[in-house]
Amino acid sequence: MTPPPIAKVSSDTVKANASGLEPATFENTAFTTPKPLSESTVAILTSASLHHPEQPGFEPRDTSFRVLDPTRRDYKLGHWSQDVDQVGYGIDYNVIFPIDRLDELAADGTIGAVADVHLAYAGNQFEVAGIRMDSGPEGAKLLLDAGVDVVLLTPV
């Protein structure tokens, strides 16, 4: 069964509807002492709904993720919110997905390496339980298994 389409709403409406929500609380929080950046492998995690042309785009209520290849530069912006200004991305994808900057930081030794995989989620979600409980931990495991030490978040 296909869910009904989500009506486009302004950011003011979203802010008003979200203003009374209580944040999630956790009994235990993780804390680790990271490696120095110069020894760390860095990945990007974006909420811009990026994907490669052959990958499916993001649909409303889609809490899955797409794995992005850092050697390619054919990223498609799949964000459907009317509040996302796509002009900056059209001029320079590094505005949302700063992969070229990471390559530069790796080349000059500021970071140890650029990860072989990066992740994209659809950030305009009203219900994040699917991400928090399923695709979020799945993506985190994928990054850990790929040897990622640091994740650069680019929220859109």
Image (cartoon, grey):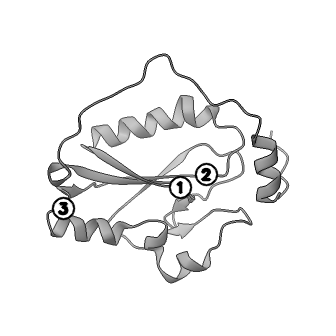
**Which one is earlier in the sequence, the residue at label 2 or at label 3?**
3
Residue type at mark 1 is: Pro
Choose between 125 and 35: the one closer to the eye.
Answer: 35
Badges 3 and 1: C-beta atoms under 8 Å apart?
no
User: In the rendered view, would you say 127 is above or below 110?
Assistant: above
Q: How many marks?
A: 3
Please tell me the numbered disc located at residue 95.
Answer: none
Q: Quadrant of residue 103?
A: bottom left
Residue at 24% x, 43% y: name it. 147
* Residue position marked by numbered label 1 in the rendering: 155
**Real-space Cα separation, disc 2 to disc 3, in angstroms:** 29 Å
Please identify the quadrant where the C terminus is shown. Answer: bottom right
Residue density around tag 2, few if under 14, some if 14–19, many if 20 or more, within 10 Å = some
Q: Report x, y in % for residue 104.
A: 24, 71
Residue 85 locus on image (x, y percent) = 65, 72
Disc 3 to disc 1, C-alpha distance: 23 Å
Q: Which residue is mark 2?
A: 123
Question: Label 3, on which residue?
Answer: 110
Residue 71 in view here? no
On the image, the x and y values in percent for residue 87 come to: 60, 80
Disc 2 marks which amino acid? Gly
